[in-house]
Amino acid sequence: MPRYVIDEAALVRNLEILKSVSERAGVRILLAQKAFSCTAVYPLCAKYLAGTTASSLFEAKHGHDNFGGETHVFAPAFIPEEMDELFGLVDHIVFNSPRQVALYGEMARKRGVSVGLRVNPEVSVATTPAYDPCRPSSRLGTTRTVLDESGLFLAAKDAKSAKVDGLHFHCLCEQGLDELKKVLAGFEEKFGEFLPQMKWVNFGGGHHITREGYDVEGLVALLNDFKARHPHLVVYLEPGEAIALNAGTLESRVLEIQPKGADGIFNAILDTSAACHMPDVIEMPYTPPLVGAEKGAGGPYAYRFGGPTCLAGDEIGVYSFKHELHEGDFVVFGDMAIYTMVKNNTFNGVNLPDIVVRHVDGSEELVRKFGYDDFACRL
Ligand SMILES: *Cc1c(COP(=O)(O)O)cnc(C)c1O
Protein backbone atom coordinates (compact mmCIF):
# COMPACT_ATOMS: atom_id res chain seq x y z
CA MET A 1 0.00 0.00 0.00
CA PRO A 2 1.49 3.40 -0.94
CA ARG A 3 1.70 6.00 1.79
CA TYR A 4 2.04 9.73 2.15
CA VAL A 5 4.50 10.60 4.88
CA ILE A 6 4.13 14.11 6.27
CA ASP A 7 7.43 15.30 7.72
CA GLU A 8 6.80 17.46 10.78
CA ALA A 9 10.41 18.65 11.00
CA ALA A 10 10.24 20.00 7.43
CA LEU A 11 6.84 21.52 8.16
CA VAL A 12 8.23 23.29 11.23
CA ARG A 13 11.11 24.71 9.16
CA ASN A 14 8.54 26.28 6.79
CA LEU A 15 6.31 27.46 9.62
CA GLU A 16 9.24 29.14 11.44
CA ILE A 17 10.01 31.17 8.30
CA LEU A 18 6.37 32.19 7.90
CA LYS A 19 6.02 33.10 11.56
CA SER A 20 9.12 35.26 11.41
CA VAL A 21 7.68 37.10 8.37
CA SER A 22 4.39 37.68 10.15
CA GLU A 23 6.14 38.96 13.28
CA ARG A 24 8.70 41.18 11.57
CA ALA A 25 6.23 42.63 9.06
CA GLY A 26 3.20 42.77 11.33
CA VAL A 27 1.02 40.77 8.94
CA ARG A 28 -1.31 37.80 9.42
CA ILE A 29 -0.62 34.60 7.50
CA LEU A 30 -3.38 32.06 6.81
CA LEU A 31 -3.17 28.50 5.49
CA ALA A 32 -4.94 28.16 2.12
CA GLN A 33 -6.48 24.74 2.67
CA LYS A 34 -6.88 24.13 -1.05
CA ALA A 35 -3.18 23.15 -1.16
CA PHE A 36 -2.87 21.24 2.10
CA SER A 37 -5.58 20.12 4.52
CA CYS A 38 -3.86 17.44 6.59
CA THR A 39 -6.03 17.53 9.72
CA ALA A 40 -3.52 15.65 11.87
CA VAL A 41 -0.95 18.45 11.72
CA TYR A 42 -3.43 21.37 12.04
CA PRO A 43 -2.72 21.80 15.77
CA LEU A 44 1.00 22.12 14.96
CA CYS A 45 0.38 24.64 12.12
CA ALA A 46 -2.01 26.62 14.31
CA LYS A 47 0.86 27.46 16.66
CA TYR A 48 2.52 29.43 13.86
CA LEU A 49 -0.30 30.82 11.70
CA ALA A 50 -3.28 33.13 12.23
CA GLY A 51 -5.90 30.79 10.77
CA THR A 52 -7.15 29.30 7.52
CA THR A 53 -8.80 30.29 4.30
CA ALA A 54 -11.31 28.24 2.35
CA SER A 55 -13.14 28.18 -0.97
CA SER A 56 -16.21 26.26 0.09
CA LEU A 57 -18.47 25.52 3.04
CA PHE A 58 -16.71 22.22 3.72
CA GLU A 59 -13.22 23.73 3.71
CA ALA A 60 -14.42 26.56 5.93
CA LYS A 61 -15.93 24.07 8.39
CA HIS A 62 -12.77 21.96 8.32
CA GLY A 63 -10.60 24.97 9.15
CA HIS A 64 -13.00 26.33 11.75
CA ASP A 65 -13.43 22.99 13.54
CA ASN A 66 -9.84 21.68 13.38
CA PHE A 67 -7.50 24.67 13.10
CA GLY A 68 -9.19 27.54 14.88
CA GLY A 69 -7.94 31.10 14.71
CA GLU A 70 -9.44 33.21 11.95
CA THR A 71 -11.52 31.51 9.25
CA HIS A 72 -11.76 33.23 5.87
CA VAL A 73 -13.63 32.16 2.75
CA PHE A 74 -13.62 33.18 -0.90
CA ALA A 75 -15.62 31.64 -3.74
CA PRO A 76 -16.29 32.76 -7.34
CA ALA A 77 -19.99 32.51 -6.43
CA PHE A 78 -21.60 31.31 -3.21
CA ILE A 79 -24.42 28.76 -2.90
CA PRO A 80 -27.59 30.37 -1.49
CA GLU A 81 -28.64 27.39 0.67
CA GLU A 82 -25.24 27.31 2.39
CA MET A 83 -24.94 30.96 3.45
CA ASP A 84 -26.57 30.62 6.84
CA GLU A 85 -24.20 27.86 7.97
CA LEU A 86 -21.22 29.58 6.36
CA PHE A 87 -21.82 32.86 8.21
CA GLY A 88 -21.75 30.91 11.47
CA LEU A 89 -18.24 29.65 10.68
CA VAL A 90 -16.26 32.49 9.10
CA ASP A 91 -14.73 35.79 10.23
CA HIS A 92 -14.11 37.14 6.72
CA ILE A 93 -16.02 36.51 3.50
CA VAL A 94 -14.51 37.65 0.21
CA PHE A 95 -16.91 38.12 -2.70
CA ASN A 96 -15.84 37.86 -6.30
CA SER A 97 -18.14 40.50 -7.75
CA PRO A 98 -20.21 43.55 -6.83
CA ARG A 99 -23.29 41.42 -7.59
CA GLN A 100 -22.33 38.90 -4.87
CA VAL A 101 -21.74 41.78 -2.44
CA ALA A 102 -25.22 43.07 -3.25
CA LEU A 103 -26.73 39.61 -2.70
CA TYR A 104 -25.01 38.65 0.56
CA GLY A 105 -23.04 41.61 1.95
CA GLU A 106 -25.71 42.92 4.31
CA MET A 107 -26.49 39.42 5.58
CA ALA A 108 -22.78 38.91 6.33
CA ARG A 109 -22.53 42.17 8.24
CA LYS A 110 -25.58 41.35 10.36
CA ARG A 111 -23.82 38.13 11.35
CA GLY A 112 -20.65 40.02 12.30
CA VAL A 113 -18.66 38.79 9.28
CA SER A 114 -16.17 41.19 7.69
CA VAL A 115 -16.90 41.71 3.98
CA GLY A 116 -14.24 41.77 1.26
CA LEU A 117 -14.16 42.11 -2.51
CA ARG A 118 -11.66 40.24 -4.67
CA VAL A 119 -10.28 42.57 -7.29
CA ASN A 120 -8.38 41.74 -10.45
CA PRO A 121 -5.38 44.05 -10.93
CA GLU A 122 -5.00 42.69 -14.49
CA VAL A 123 -1.29 42.09 -14.07
CA SER A 124 -0.46 38.69 -15.57
CA VAL A 125 2.65 37.15 -14.02
CA ALA A 126 1.75 33.45 -13.72
CA THR A 127 3.66 31.30 -16.18
CA THR A 128 0.76 29.14 -17.44
CA PRO A 129 -2.78 30.33 -18.27
CA ALA A 130 -4.36 27.61 -16.11
CA TYR A 131 -2.74 29.23 -13.06
CA ASP A 132 -3.21 32.85 -14.08
CA PRO A 133 -6.26 34.49 -12.49
CA CYS A 134 -5.42 37.65 -14.47
CA ARG A 135 -5.61 35.96 -17.86
CA PRO A 136 -7.86 37.70 -20.42
CA SER A 137 -11.59 37.31 -19.66
CA SER A 138 -10.81 35.66 -16.31
CA ARG A 139 -13.83 34.91 -14.12
CA LEU A 140 -11.78 35.59 -10.97
CA GLY A 141 -11.85 39.01 -9.36
CA THR A 142 -13.48 42.33 -10.23
CA THR A 143 -11.66 44.56 -12.69
CA ARG A 144 -11.60 48.30 -12.20
CA THR A 145 -13.92 48.73 -15.20
CA VAL A 146 -16.52 46.33 -13.79
CA LEU A 147 -16.22 47.95 -10.37
CA ASP A 148 -16.82 51.42 -11.79
CA GLU A 149 -19.82 50.24 -13.81
CA SER A 150 -21.33 48.58 -10.72
CA GLY A 151 -21.39 51.76 -8.65
CA LEU A 152 -20.50 49.68 -5.58
CA PHE A 153 -18.15 52.27 -4.13
CA LEU A 154 -20.24 55.34 -4.97
CA ALA A 155 -21.71 55.48 -1.51
CA ALA A 156 -18.41 54.59 0.08
CA LYS A 157 -16.63 57.92 0.04
CA ASP A 158 -17.73 58.12 3.63
CA ALA A 159 -16.22 55.17 5.49
CA LYS A 160 -19.33 54.50 7.60
CA SER A 161 -21.43 53.70 4.55
CA ALA A 162 -18.80 51.51 2.88
CA LYS A 163 -20.24 48.18 1.86
CA VAL A 164 -16.85 46.53 1.80
CA ASP A 165 -14.29 46.30 4.63
CA GLY A 166 -11.37 44.94 2.67
CA LEU A 167 -9.88 44.18 -0.73
CA HIS A 168 -8.35 40.88 -1.82
CA PHE A 169 -6.12 40.08 -4.76
CA HIS A 170 -4.59 36.74 -5.77
CA CYS A 171 -2.46 36.72 -8.91
CA LEU A 172 0.63 34.63 -8.12
CA CYS A 173 1.48 30.96 -8.51
CA GLU A 174 4.77 29.61 -7.10
CA GLN A 175 6.30 33.05 -7.45
CA GLY A 176 8.85 35.33 -5.87
CA LEU A 177 9.17 38.92 -4.78
CA ASP A 178 9.65 40.47 -8.24
CA GLU A 179 6.25 39.21 -9.39
CA LEU A 180 4.62 40.36 -6.14
CA LYS A 181 6.09 43.84 -6.67
CA LYS A 182 4.55 44.02 -10.15
CA VAL A 183 1.15 42.85 -8.95
CA LEU A 184 1.15 45.15 -5.92
CA ALA A 185 2.05 48.15 -8.09
CA GLY A 186 -0.86 47.31 -10.41
CA PHE A 187 -3.20 46.82 -7.46
CA GLU A 188 -2.29 50.16 -5.89
CA GLU A 189 -2.50 51.97 -9.21
CA LYS A 190 -5.99 50.64 -9.97
CA PHE A 191 -7.51 50.35 -6.48
CA GLY A 192 -5.25 52.41 -4.20
CA GLU A 193 -7.76 55.26 -3.98
CA PHE A 194 -10.16 52.99 -2.05
CA LEU A 195 -7.60 51.93 0.56
CA PRO A 196 -8.30 54.80 3.00
CA GLN A 197 -11.84 53.42 3.40
CA MET A 198 -10.70 49.84 3.93
CA LYS A 199 -9.84 48.00 7.15
CA TRP A 200 -7.76 45.25 5.59
CA VAL A 201 -6.08 44.01 2.44
CA ASN A 202 -5.44 40.38 1.56
CA PHE A 203 -2.44 39.72 -0.71
CA GLY A 204 -3.70 36.21 -1.66
CA GLY A 205 -1.48 33.16 -2.12
CA GLY A 206 1.13 31.90 -4.57
CA HIS A 207 3.99 33.41 -2.56
CA HIS A 208 6.74 30.76 -2.65
CA ILE A 209 8.19 32.10 0.60
CA THR A 210 9.72 28.85 1.87
CA ARG A 211 11.40 27.92 -1.41
CA GLU A 212 15.19 28.00 -1.36
CA GLY A 213 16.36 31.35 -2.67
CA TYR A 214 13.12 33.26 -1.99
CA ASP A 215 13.95 36.82 -0.92
CA VAL A 216 12.39 36.68 2.55
CA GLU A 217 14.11 39.87 3.72
CA GLY A 218 12.84 41.67 0.62
CA LEU A 219 9.29 40.49 1.39
CA VAL A 220 9.51 41.78 4.97
CA ALA A 221 10.78 45.14 3.65
CA LEU A 222 8.02 45.35 1.01
CA LEU A 223 5.32 44.58 3.58
CA ASN A 224 6.73 47.09 6.06
CA ASP A 225 6.84 49.72 3.33
CA PHE A 226 3.20 49.02 2.40
CA LYS A 227 2.16 49.18 6.03
CA ALA A 228 4.04 52.46 6.56
CA ARG A 229 2.04 53.97 3.69
CA HIS A 230 -1.27 52.46 4.91
CA PRO A 231 -0.89 52.19 8.69
CA HIS A 232 -4.62 51.64 9.30
CA LEU A 233 -4.75 48.41 7.26
CA VAL A 234 -4.44 44.85 8.55
CA VAL A 235 -2.50 42.88 5.94
CA TYR A 236 -3.14 39.19 5.24
CA LEU A 237 -1.19 36.66 3.18
CA GLU A 238 -2.75 33.29 2.42
CA PRO A 239 -0.18 30.93 0.91
CA GLY A 240 -0.95 27.24 0.51
CA GLU A 241 2.11 25.67 -1.11
CA ALA A 242 4.62 27.61 0.99
CA ILE A 243 3.29 26.05 4.18
CA ALA A 244 3.94 22.43 3.25
CA LEU A 245 6.48 22.81 0.44
CA ASN A 246 8.85 19.79 0.47
CA ALA A 247 7.23 18.62 3.70
CA GLY A 248 5.99 15.23 2.57
CA THR A 249 6.78 12.22 0.40
CA LEU A 250 4.77 9.56 -1.39
CA GLU A 251 6.27 6.11 -0.94
CA SER A 252 5.38 3.46 -3.46
CA ARG A 253 6.34 -0.11 -4.39
CA VAL A 254 7.45 -1.46 -7.75
CA LEU A 255 4.91 -4.11 -8.78
CA GLU A 256 6.46 -5.21 -12.05
CA ILE A 257 9.24 -4.28 -14.44
CA GLN A 258 8.51 -5.00 -18.09
CA PRO A 259 11.15 -5.85 -20.71
CA LYS A 260 13.00 -2.87 -22.22
CA GLY A 261 10.95 -0.97 -24.80
CA ALA A 262 12.11 0.17 -28.25
CA ASP A 263 13.36 3.41 -26.68
CA GLY A 264 15.64 1.55 -24.28
CA ILE A 265 13.53 2.43 -21.25
CA PHE A 266 11.92 -0.16 -18.96
CA ASN A 267 8.25 0.33 -18.13
CA ALA A 268 7.82 -0.10 -14.39
CA ILE A 269 4.36 -0.43 -12.85
CA LEU A 270 3.98 1.09 -9.40
CA ASP A 271 1.25 0.67 -6.79
CA THR A 272 0.70 4.43 -6.94
CA SER A 273 -1.04 6.32 -9.74
CA ALA A 274 -0.43 9.78 -11.17
CA ALA A 275 -4.11 10.02 -12.08
CA CYS A 276 -5.32 9.13 -8.57
CA HIS A 277 -2.60 10.18 -6.13
CA MET A 278 -0.69 13.01 -7.78
CA PRO A 279 -3.11 14.47 -10.36
CA ASP A 280 -1.03 17.65 -10.75
CA VAL A 281 1.63 15.52 -12.45
CA ILE A 282 -0.85 15.14 -15.32
CA GLU A 283 -2.74 18.44 -14.96
CA MET A 284 0.14 20.88 -14.57
CA PRO A 285 2.01 18.87 -15.95
CA TYR A 286 5.30 18.20 -14.15
CA THR A 287 7.67 15.39 -13.16
CA PRO A 288 8.02 15.07 -9.40
CA PRO A 289 11.45 14.62 -7.80
CA LEU A 290 12.38 11.05 -6.85
CA VAL A 291 14.81 10.31 -4.02
CA GLY A 292 18.05 8.71 -5.29
CA ALA A 293 17.26 9.12 -8.99
CA GLU A 294 17.69 11.67 -11.78
CA LYS A 295 14.85 12.81 -13.99
CA GLY A 296 15.17 11.70 -17.61
CA ALA A 297 16.76 8.74 -19.40
CA GLY A 298 20.37 9.91 -18.99
CA GLY A 299 21.60 7.28 -16.49
CA PRO A 300 22.52 3.59 -16.85
CA TYR A 301 19.12 2.25 -15.71
CA ALA A 302 16.15 4.22 -17.01
CA TYR A 303 12.57 3.47 -16.01
CA ARG A 304 9.25 4.93 -17.05
CA PHE A 305 7.05 4.82 -13.97
CA GLY A 306 3.34 4.27 -14.50
CA GLY A 307 0.35 3.63 -12.30
CA PRO A 308 -1.81 0.53 -11.88
CA THR A 309 -4.83 2.04 -13.70
CA CYS A 310 -5.89 1.33 -17.29
CA LEU A 311 -5.33 4.93 -18.36
CA ALA A 312 -2.57 5.05 -21.01
CA GLY A 313 -1.58 8.50 -19.80
CA ASP A 314 -1.19 7.41 -16.17
CA GLU A 315 2.57 7.96 -16.32
CA ILE A 316 4.58 9.68 -13.63
CA GLY A 317 7.77 10.23 -15.58
CA VAL A 318 11.10 8.76 -16.68
CA TYR A 319 13.86 8.40 -14.07
CA SER A 320 17.42 7.12 -14.15
CA PHE A 321 19.13 5.10 -11.46
CA LYS A 322 22.74 4.06 -11.00
CA HIS A 323 21.57 0.57 -10.07
CA GLU A 324 18.98 -1.85 -11.35
CA LEU A 325 15.49 -1.77 -9.84
CA HIS A 326 13.66 -4.93 -8.81
CA GLU A 327 10.08 -5.90 -8.14
CA GLY A 328 9.23 -5.14 -4.54
CA ASP A 329 11.63 -2.17 -4.31
CA PHE A 330 10.30 1.02 -2.79
CA VAL A 331 10.58 4.42 -4.47
CA VAL A 332 10.03 7.77 -2.76
CA PHE A 333 8.57 10.80 -4.56
CA GLY A 334 9.42 14.20 -3.08
CA ASP A 335 7.28 17.29 -2.42
CA MET A 336 4.08 15.26 -2.12
CA ALA A 337 2.33 17.06 0.76
CA ILE A 338 0.79 19.82 -1.34
CA TYR A 339 -1.98 19.47 -3.92
CA THR A 340 -2.02 15.67 -3.49
CA MET A 341 -4.20 14.43 -0.59
CA VAL A 342 -6.63 17.30 -1.29
CA LYS A 343 -7.01 16.16 -4.92
CA ASN A 344 -7.00 12.37 -4.48
CA ASN A 345 -9.55 10.18 -6.14
CA THR A 346 -10.27 6.46 -6.43
CA PHE A 347 -10.49 6.29 -10.24
CA ASN A 348 -10.46 2.68 -11.45
CA GLY A 349 -11.02 1.53 -7.87
CA VAL A 350 -7.44 2.30 -6.90
CA ASN A 351 -7.23 2.61 -3.12
CA LEU A 352 -6.03 5.81 -1.48
CA PRO A 353 -2.56 5.86 0.11
CA ASP A 354 -2.22 5.69 3.88
CA ILE A 355 -1.45 8.99 5.59
CA VAL A 356 1.44 8.83 8.03
CA VAL A 357 2.91 11.64 10.13
CA ARG A 358 6.62 11.48 10.92
CA HIS A 359 6.99 13.37 14.16
CA VAL A 360 9.94 15.62 14.97
CA ASP A 361 11.46 12.84 17.14
CA GLY A 362 11.44 10.49 14.12
CA SER A 363 8.56 8.27 15.27
CA GLU A 364 5.87 7.51 12.70
CA GLU A 365 2.13 7.61 13.30
CA LEU A 366 -0.43 6.15 10.92
CA VAL A 367 -3.27 8.70 10.94
CA ARG A 368 -5.50 7.46 8.10
CA LYS A 369 -6.04 4.18 6.31
CA PHE A 370 -8.58 3.73 3.53
CA GLY A 371 -10.53 0.80 2.22
CA TYR A 372 -13.30 -0.43 -0.05
CA ASP A 373 -15.94 1.72 1.68
CA ASP A 374 -14.10 4.93 0.79
CA PHE A 375 -14.42 3.90 -2.86
CA ALA A 376 -17.95 2.47 -2.78
CA CYS A 377 -19.63 5.12 -0.60
CA ARG A 378 -19.41 7.76 -3.33
CA LEU A 379 -20.93 5.68 -6.10
C1 LIG B 1 -4.97 28.76 -4.57
C2 LIG B 1 -5.22 29.95 -3.75
C3 LIG B 1 -4.36 30.26 -2.68
C4 LIG B 1 -3.14 29.43 -2.34
O1 LIG B 1 -2.25 29.41 -3.41
P1 LIG B 1 -0.82 28.68 -3.30
O2 LIG B 1 -0.32 28.76 -4.70
O3 LIG B 1 -1.04 27.29 -2.85
O4 LIG B 1 0.00 29.47 -2.35
C5 LIG B 1 -4.67 31.37 -1.93
N1 LIG B 1 -5.74 32.15 -2.19
C6 LIG B 1 -6.57 31.89 -3.23
C7 LIG B 1 -7.73 32.78 -3.48
C8 LIG B 1 -6.34 30.79 -4.04
O5 LIG B 1 -7.15 30.53 -5.07
Image (cartoon, rainbow, N blue to C red):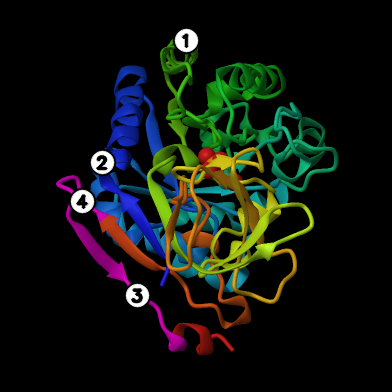
- Along the viewing direction, whichever of 315 and 201 lies nearer the viewer: 315
Q: Amino acid at mark 3?
A: Lys
Identify which residue is drawn at 49% across, 10% down. 229
Task: Report the Cα–Cα distance between label 4 and label 3.
Answer: 18 Å
Instruction: Label 1, secondary structure: give it.
Output: helix
The picture places residue 90, in percent across and down from the top left corner, at: 42, 55
- Does residue 191 appear to the left or right of 249 in the view shown? right
Question: Mark 4 and mark 1: span between their CA atoms?
Answer: 38 Å
Cα distance in 3D space between marks 2 and 3: 22 Å
Assign the C terminus to one quadrant of the image.
bottom right
Q: Earlier in the sequence, mark 2 or mark 1?
A: 2
Badge 1 is on which residue? 225
Q: In x, y percent, where is residue 240? A: 48, 43
The residue wearing badge 3 is: 369
Which label sits on residue 9? 2
- Which numbered disc flags the more N-terminal residue, 2 or 3? 2
